[in-house]
Amino acid sequence: MMRWDRLFVPTKYIYARTKLVYAAALSTQKRLAGEIADGDTLVTFWKHFIKGKMTYLYRNEGQEMAPTIPGKVETLLIRNLPCLDHEYRINYKQVSVGDVVLLKNPLDSDKFLVRRLAAVGGQEMVSTDEKDEPFVVEDDQCWVLSDNQELKAKEAKDSRMFGPVPVMDIMGRVIYRFQSMKDHGLVENSNCNSKEDTAVLNFELELNEMQKISEA
């Protein structure tokens, strides 16, 4: 059944709704992690809803994600994705296969990687190499790949090299890239969360700030 009331929802209402869910998830995550006391949850919620931003900047180096992120050094706008479930894990509804995500580097826990989400728990992965057997990604795990088809598996530094990674190690979704004032734009994702991402961009994208990070 068509929901006509959802066809023409102004961007500001989508942004407010998205931020409401974000603030609730983030404050809950902090409480579960012991970062705030139970009595401070509501105060933390309003702080993030009224004054907080759902995005942050990340300086990406390397060409593993070319041509999606073509520059050797680019400033990326990351949409923060806090957990939403009671087990302190990121909810699959926040990320979808095809999304470009920022995740903890399995090879160096102090660093991060930008890769494309290729599969989540319960989904089958089939290799282009006939010698490799198909396999199913375990629950709470995900498989990430480099976009650069010219790189070998070891050069791409993705799941072909280090295997599946915990979904909870995903920090956010990359929604915008900036190389210069003449070269910047949206990052191609799965489109499952395109309305929310677009609303976030409309209110939180600041090219001048991205330029400062890019030139630093």
Image (tube, grey):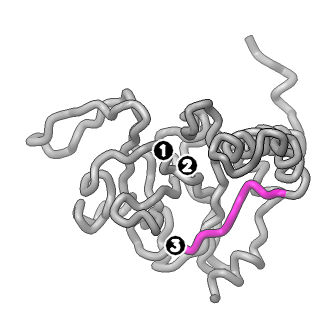
- 182 left or right of 146 in image: right
Query: Label 2, on which residue?
Result: 189
Provide residue 202's location: percent of width, then percent of height: 81, 56
Q: CA distance from mark 1 to mark 2?
A: 6 Å
Closer to us: mark 2 or mark 3? 3
User: Which quadrant of the structure image shows residue 146?
Assistant: bottom left
Q: Does dot 1 land on a helix, a strand or a loop?
A: loop
Residue 60, labelled with which disc?
3
In the rendered structure, which disc, 2 or 3, sits on the residue that comes first in sequence?
3
Question: How far apart are the alpha carbons under marks 2 and 3?
Answer: 17 Å
Disc nearer the start of the sequence (1/3): 3
Task: Tell me how far mark 1 sits from mark 3, CA to CA.
Answer: 19 Å
Residue at the limit of the structure toward the left, as seen here: 131
Q: Residue under label 1, please give it.
A: 98
Q: Nearer the viewer, residue 43 or 92?
A: 43
Give above or below for 1 relative to 53.
Answer: above
Q: Are marks 1 and 3 in contact (CB under 8 Å)?
A: no
Given the image, on which type of amino acid does mark 1 rest?
A: Gly
Residue 212 in magenta stretch? no
Which quadrant does the N terminus fall into? top right
| Circle 1/circle 2 CB separation < 8 Å | yes
**57 or 205, nearer to the observer:** 57
Q: What are the residue bounds of the magenta stretch?
A: 52-59
Crowding near pointer 2: few (<14 within 10 Å), some, many (20+)?
Answer: many
Q: Magenta span: helix, strand or loop, mainly?
A: strand
Q: Which part of the image, by quadrant, shows the C terminus?
A: bottom right
Residue 66 placement, left or right of 33: left
Judged from this view, the residue extending furthest toward the top is 1
Name which residue type carries label 2.
Asn
Residue placed most toward the observer, 132 or 68: 132
